[in-house]
Image (cartoon, rainbow, N blue to C red):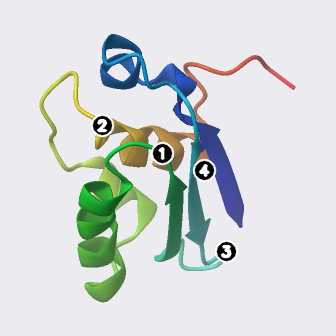
Amino acid sequence: MVTKMPNTINYRAIAYNKPYGWTKIVVERGSKRVVGFHMIGPWASEIVNTAVIAIKKGLTLDEVKELVFSHPVFTELLIDAMELASGSNVYLPKR
């Protein structure tokens, strides 16, 4: 399963006037393990570190969603994309 989230919903990106790009999560359907992460936008090179840990450790969506991040930070995009992959959608219009 692939979920793509626009970076325009991130409060830190808005505050820095850089709300562009996207964050994409790839999740294995059966196990719900995080198996991929792609991002284009500000601070992508730093956010990818958290995604790599999740992938290397074989964490599931639920396990990654339990991680705690301060607010507002760019890394929240990772959690927001995971929430969307889990069926929760706080920021985007319903389809």
- N-terminal label among 3 and 1: 3
Check disc 1 and give the amino acid type: Gly
Residue 73 % position (x, y): 23, 31
- The amino acid pointed to by label 4 is Ala
In the rendered image, residue 80, in percent from the top left (x then y), is placed at: 45, 37
Q: Earlier in the sequence, mark 2 or mark 3?
A: 3
Label 3 and label 4: CA atoms lie apart by 10 Å
Distance from Cα at disc 2 to Cα at disc 1: 10 Å
Look at mark 2 in the image and give the residue it sits on: 74
- Residue 15 sits in quarter: top left
Q: Three-letter amino acid code at disc 2? A: Phe
| Residue with the mark numbered 3 | 29
Q: Nearer the viewer, mark 1 or mark 4?
A: 1
Q: Residue at x 51, y 57 (%)?
A: 39
Residue position marked by numbered label 1 in the rendering = 41
Q: Residue furthest right?
A: 95
Give the answer, above or below, for where 3 lies relative to 21.
below
Disc on the earlier residue, 4 or 2: 2
Would you say residue 86 is visible in this rendering? no
